Amino acid sequence: MSFQSEIIETPNFARVVADEIHASISDVLDSKDQCSIVLSGGKTPASIYRLLGRPPRVNSIDWPKVHLFWGDERWVPKDDLHSNYRLVHETLIAHIDNKPVVHAVDTTLGTSAAGAKAYQEAIINQCGVEPEFDIVLLGVGTDGHTASLFPGAAELHNTTDLCFAVRHENVDVDRITLGPKAFLKAKKIFYIVSGQGKAEIVKKVFEGEDDLDHLPAQIYRKAKGSVTVFLDSASGSLLKKS
Ligand code: 6PG
């Protein structure tokens, strides 16, 4: 695993990260016919997805060769304001003429357990039983979670399954989340974290002692590929200036 962090002046953060994602997708498509990217939810990536969905970037990716997946999803209808699918559709997919291949979580199934099972099968059908996604985007919550792997989650130690239905006291709806087996073989993992409110947790996750059960975002420490942490000057403000 290679690890690097990049602190970017806040006004440039979304543009720099959008350019990095764009370049990574282009590099993958220079070497093969498909690029699989796992998208993160929450608020942080919205501005980045918007930039990817606008000229010039939107016109210089061969989107039909790009397979979009979600690292986690809220167990809500696709048109719900809290849906990560809706976030990506509104900011990115709706603005692309030649559509990417969208592998969304089916939240119309009766239970989140059925949703997780179906999503795991969809991933296996597309990527095989040991998926090696080209790019994985992850955020970090102020409680140290990433995707929907929350502190104390047993799923953090499950290396058998790809996808889980989870419920946690820190959130008010059931979630579907990918787990270590899905994330850790990725070629590239990008953490995307911004805002002063994340400065404390960023220091704990990326400079603190190993404490995966309390800080699930430390999952990267078992990654096989390259890990890059993109921080804006606010979220990275407490890191050692190395
Ligand atoms: C989600 C995300 C989650 C998110 C963090 C940070 O569905 O909420 O996948 O892991 O990345 O909670 O969220 P913000 O970007 O909103 O701070």
Image (cartoon, rainbow, N blue to C red):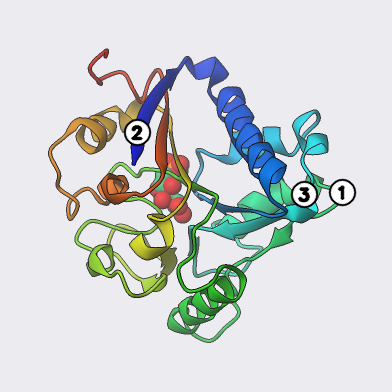
Residue at the spot 33% in from the left edge and 59% down from the top edge: 149
Q: Is residue 79 above or below residue 96?
A: below
Q: Which residue in the structure is indicated by mark 1?
A: 97
Residue furthest right as drawn: 97
Percent x, y for residue 182?
A: 43, 62
Residue 189, label in figure: none
Q: Position of residue 151 (x, y in %)?
A: 22, 56
Q: Is mark 3 within 8 Å of ligand 1?
A: no
Foreground mark, 1 or 2, reads 2
Lower position in the chain sequence, tag 1 or tag 2: 2
The kind of residue on which mark 1 rests is: Asp
Question: Viewed as shown, does residue 26 lie left or right of 9?
Answer: right
Which amino acid lies under the numbered mark 2 shown in the image of this protein? Phe
In the depicted structure, whether residue 227 falls above or below residue 170: above
Residue at the (63%, 28%) spot, across then down: 19
Residue hosting label 2: 3
- Give percent across and percent down for residue 33: 73, 53
Q: Which mark is residue 63?
A: 3
| Alpha carbon separation for disc pair 1 and 2 | 35 Å
On-image quarter of the C terminus: top left
